[in-house]
Image (cartoon, rainbow, N blue to C red):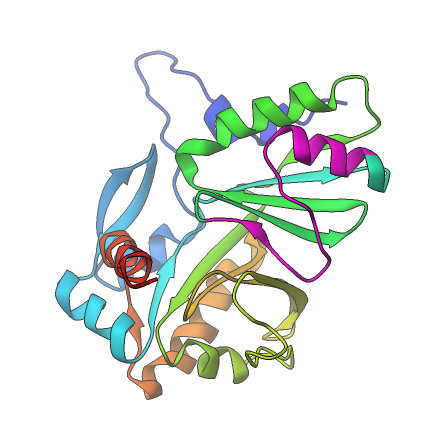
Amino acid sequence: MSLEFLEPDGATSELGFEPVPASVLLPQAREAGGRIELRDGWRVAAEYGSVERELEACRTAVGVGDVSCLGKLELQGPASEVAAVGAAAGAEEIEFGRAAGGPEVWWCPFSARRLLAVCEPGRAPTLREALADAATRRPVSVTDLTCALAGLALVGPRARDVLARLTAIDLRPPTTPEASFRAGSVARIPAMVLREHGDRYVLMFGSAYAQYMWAQVTDAAEPLGGMAAGADALARSREEVAAGA
């Protein structure tokens, strides 16, 4: 059975209508005052009134941003075959609990038989095609979970404190250093935490829980000086981390 209907870029124009993917959290972004713009083919909240104020929150407290538009491609199959398909598409050596690659593509292993590739929205179609080509004649499935999984970025020195209020996953640096991937319960629902570089975490979970998770995370962040951060502030924050690395 084909799962191509899950691919967000698979929609085609019809009767003069041009379909544009939108995050499941777009209503929450609008309600929070987000200015919606088109980025990488997706409608996202570009900012929430002041990019500089949001960026300052990312520097000194925590910024919470919707990153559901990130590409999320899952490989499943025998361990050796999954490793071979991932390697053909650029994955480095995969180690359980660790995330390889970044920042354009992160390779996140659930297990030796199951690997999640998380990439920038513009990279998703090309990466999916590369994985599908590498999986040809191999017992490996490639499934686009971009729309099935929502995502929130937590950026700033209080990001880990926010997550500590919601999960028992041990995110202390000795256990979860940079480039780590953890799966477990967050706010009582199944979720995944990718720690990229510095104080930048990406929380992924089922899209059906998106509104609930947005409320839980923002409620936990506000007492710590946190606020919603749009795509512009998140991008500039990443650039600052890269420049200081």
Picture quadrant where residue 63 is located: bottom left
Identify the residue at the far front of this view: 245
Name the side, left or right, on which 245 lies relative to 209.
Answer: left
Return the x and y of residue 130 as percentages of the image width and height: 59, 23
Q: Residue at x 50, y 26 (%)?
A: 125
* Position above or below: 88 against 186: above
Name the side, left or right, on which 180 lies relative to 41.
Answer: right
Return the x and y of residue 87 as percentages of the image width and height: 67, 34
Which of the pair 172/168 is nearer the observer?
Answer: 172
Name the side, left or right, on which 154 lies relative to 10.
Answer: left
* Position above or below: 53 against 236: below
Task: Give yes or no for residue 85 being in the magenta stretch.
Answer: yes
Return the x and y of residue 136 as percentages of the image width and height: 75, 18
Identify the residue at the far bottom of this view: 223
Which of the pair 232/178 is nearer the observer?
Answer: 178
- Magenta residues, as a range? 81-102
Query: What is the count of numbered marks?
Result: 0
Q: State the quadrant of the C terminus.
A: bottom left
Which of the pair 203/104 is nearer the observer?
Answer: 104
Q: State the quadrant of the N terminus.
A: top right
Task: Give yes or no for residue 111 being in the magenta stretch.
Answer: no
Name the side, left or right, on which 191 lies relative to 84.
Answer: left
Picture quadrant where residue 158 is located: bottom left
Q: Residue at x 71, y 38 (%)?
A: 75
Q: Residue at x 75, y 32 (%)?
A: 84
Return the x and y of residue 52 as percentages of the image width and height: 13, 65
